[in-house]
Amino acid sequence: MSNTSRIAKNTIALYFRQILIMLVSLYTSRVVLASLGVVDYGIYSAIGGFVAMFSIMSGSMAVAVSRFITIEIGCGDKNKMQLIFSTSVIIQFFMAVSVVVIAEVVGVWFLNAKMVIPAQRVSVANFVFQCSLVTFVVNLLSVPYNAVIIAHEKMSAFAYISILEVILKLGLAFLLNISPFDKLAVYAILLCVIAVMIRLVYGIYCKFNFSETKFKFVFEIRIIKKMFAFIGWAFIGNGVVVLKDQGINVLMNLFCGPIVNAARGISMQVNAAVYSFVQNFMTAVNPQITKNYAIKNLETMHSLVIRSAKFGFFIMMLLVVPLCANINYILGIWLVEVPAHTANFIVLVLVYSLFGSLSQPLLTGILAEGKIKWYEIALGIAYSMNFVAVYVLLKSGLAVELVFVVNIVFEFVVLAILLYQSKKKYSLSLQMFFIKTLVPCFFVFLLSCLIVFILPLKNAENLWRFILDSLIIVAINSALVLFIGMNKDERFYIKNLVFNKIGGVRK
């Protein structure tokens, strides 16, 4: 199977999964918010975000495992793959123990002494913290298995297992609705149970499909040193990303309270649903970028980086513009109770992720090269400044929406860092990226926003008007993307991709 066909097949499998997941997840979140109420939903979002700060360690390990296994697949060394997998499992276990110790000492103190939680909900908040910690550790131990699936490009596995997960969460919503017990505590327990079940399914799948996932208590010091040299610098980058995302969530709790956390939680859920379309596309492309670097096929690698950045941006833009144009109507029919600031948060977060989508292929190329010291240092400085700027902003009592504006500004700083490092590490032509990706993406987006602003395609008042306006916006944006955003070769590529898939289905 060609690389293009493999990427297309994997992307389609992931999109099928994501459409179903998005629809069920949005309905589930409506039921959960209605059952918990805004305050309890905000408490869970704040505590979940605080626990997620410990992913400083797990995130860097996930990047390392995926990178090293993908490189070995490209080189074809199965024995080394098994050695890397077994080593990563051992490392993850010790990381899990470290997380539990730190969380029980520092986390419990911070939760009770610093976080803004209504007095009558402090005891259940502590219970939720423990459940969230167990869920986090279970997901931490799943990292090597998930990395193997991605490295082998078996995206259909993610599709089926994720469908199972979303069905279980739908069942959770119904159980929560009829539960006679404290709903916040029940919600935390059920999420923990689902995490354990999904972890077992991933483990069983890997055991029967990938020989290298047969764990052996063996490791090689040379590989550990190599992985930790990579993890050490990735730890800095992942740490500041967590600080910027979850740390800011904690700041919002300290300065604004759980209701603002609820609004942010909803906006991040919408963003996750939308951005996952880009993420699925990049999940299908990333292994190809890494494998082409491994065999030193830089020309194909550069082409994948440039095209995937552009396609990822346009995929997200087709969803973001109609959503933002009618966000108040969407929230009105989706949620029973809409927390203050939610609409503004969603629009700003989606714009942030839209521009952030340009960075993902560049980052994959840098990680494939492996020497990430100076990139991680630069990233650490940028995101630390972002966090400090947000702290000063909130401390000054300015509008909380400015938090997301600051994030958008610093995302452009990160993009500039990635471009410089990409040129230095794998000889990406900045002029080519600017002409083929940045210029058409920004021009099409600005033109799209201008058309929506001028034409009466926003602030729908009923369902039929919303559907009609959204279809018109998507049609206009699709035309802009095809005839302005893409060149002749890219249009030909899309045309062949579509017709090949239609032909494949007919056969």
Image (cartoon, grey):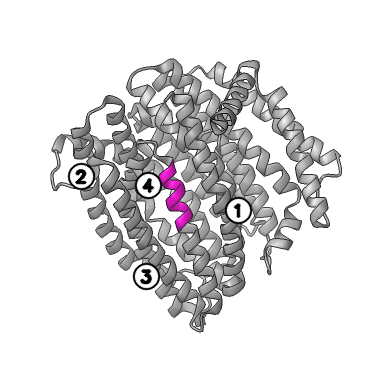
Q: Give the amino acid type for the residue marked by disc 2 in the picture.
A: Ser
Mark 2 or mark 3, whichever is nearer to me: 2
Judged from the image, the secondary structure of the residue bearing numbered disc 3 is helix
Judged from the image, the secondary structure of the residue bearing numbered disc 4 is helix
For the C terminus, the quadrant is top right
Q: Determine crowd level at label 2: few under 14, some 14-19, many 20+ residues with C-alpha closer than 10 A.
A: many
Compare marks 1 and 4 and give the one earlier in the sequence: 4
Compare marks 3 and 4 and give the one earlier in the sequence: 4
Q: Position of residue 233 (x, y in %)?
A: 33, 38
Q: Give the amino acid type for the residue marked by disc 3 in the picture.
A: Gln
Q: Tell me how far mark 2 sits from mark 4, CA to CA.
A: 18 Å
Q: Is residue 162 magenta?
A: yes
Q: Position of residue 439 (x, y in %)?
A: 65, 24
Compare marks 1 and 3 and give the one earlier in the sequence: 3
Mark 2 or mark 4, whichever is nearer to me: 2
Q: Give the amino acid type for the residue marked by disc 4 in the picture.
A: Gly
Quadrant of the rendered image containing residue 411? top right
Residue extent of the magenta highlight: 156-164
Please name the residue that numbered disc 4 is placed on: 59
Q: Tell me how far mark 1 sits from mark 2, CA to CA.
A: 36 Å
Q: Is residue 377 magenta?
A: no
Please name the residue that numbered disc 1 is placed on: 270
Residue that extends furthest to the front in the rendered view of this protein: 507
Mark 1 or mark 3, whichever is nearer to me: 1
Judged from the image, the secondary structure of the residue bearing numbered disc 2 is helix
Please state if 447 lies on the left or on the right of 435 as rendered. right
Give residue 130's mark: 3
The residue nearer to you, when weighing 251 against 74, is 74
Q: Is residue 123 visible?
A: yes
Q: Position of residue 235 (x, y in %)?
A: 34, 44
Please name the residue that numbered disc 2 is placed on: 86
Please tell me whether residue 132 is drawn above or below residue 399 in the rendered image. below
